[in-house]
Amino acid sequence: MRRLALLILLLPILLLLYGLAEAVQDPQVVRYRIALPGLGRPLRIVQLSDSHASPIDMPTVRLDRVMAQINALHPDLIVLTGDYIGGKKFDVPMSLSTAIDPFHRLRAPLGVYAVRGNHDGRYWTRWGFARGEAVMLSNHWADVGPVILAGAPSLAEGRNPAGAMIRAVQAAPTGKPLILIAHEPDFFRFVPPRVALMIAGHTHGGQIRLPFRDGLAGSPYLAAHRRGVFREHGQTLVVSSGLGTSLVPLRIGVPPEIVEITLVPAG
């Protein structure tokens, strides 16, 4: 009986230690291969999402290591899908420059493009990325080699972020497949038919998945689109479980990840 009582007392501590250890491990590279209609040649994209810089589990030295890991993959294009700062209940503040400066080390032949997340201030994050190579693409589009890349705002921005996303997509030229990068997967419900592929993060894959709880989710839609590749209505959605943590610096059953997407011409 005493042993059982001791085990019950120790179990939360063991879970905390396990969750912290999983949260700070080096990210695994998750690879997807997707056939994209209208694509003229293969394209390799690396996505990083939800770094949530923090002295606790995402210090600068760890971010530097992750940036080196991404560069070593030699992608054609790098996309960053938001939540670069904070987000925990109890944390030591980290300056914006400290959180974003490591991203200035990223290099790819077709460039580095980013959108904001719900934890990122609109103007501060734009200023932080303006000091480096990455292009902040929220509400804009860019002609990127064999594709057009458009960026959505965060759902936390403005009165009608879905409308802003639709306008950015409609303003983009035709003739090439269009890829939308966004923080929240929720946008996938509203994307125009013009969007062939959407790349998102935000969910952390549920972050904490236990036998009696299938991870955290803010809505039934997010619960159904936590992580992976989803094909609906002739369009494709990729959701990354991301790198960092929010609320608490723990990951259980959902390791940190970098996503590598190899796009090939359909047919």
Image: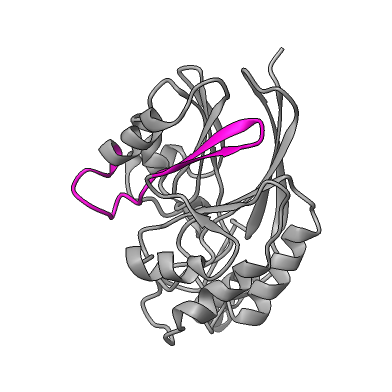
Residue ranking furthest to the top: 267
Viewer-side residue, 158 vs 56 = 158
Q: Is residue 142 above or below residue 49?
A: above
Q: Residue 122, how many percent across, how many down?
A: 34, 63
Q: Residue at x 57, y 77 (%)?
A: 57
Q: Tell me how the rendering is colored.
A: one colour
Q: Is residue 147 magenta?
A: yes
Viewer-side residue, 28 vs 168 = 168
Residue 37's image quarter?
A: top right
Q: Residue at x 50, y 59 (%)?
A: 207
Q: Residue at x 76, y 59 (%)?
A: 71
Q: Is residue 84 magenta?
A: no
Residue ranking furthest to the bottom: 92
Viewer-side residue, 213 vs 152 = 152
Q: Is residue 29 above or below residue 22?
A: above
Q: Is residue 196 left or right of residue 117?
A: right
Viewer-side residue, 88 vs 216 = 88
Residue 163's image quarter?
A: top left
Residue 60's image quarter?
A: bottom right
Decide if residue 191 is in sight here: no
Q: The magenta stretch spans which residues?
A: 140-162
Q: Residue 61, how many percent across, how many down?
A: 67, 81
Q: Is residue 39 above or below residue 65?
A: above
Decide if residue 264 is in sight here: yes
Q: Is residue 263 left or right of residue 248?
A: right
Q: Is residue 193 left or right of residue 30?
A: left
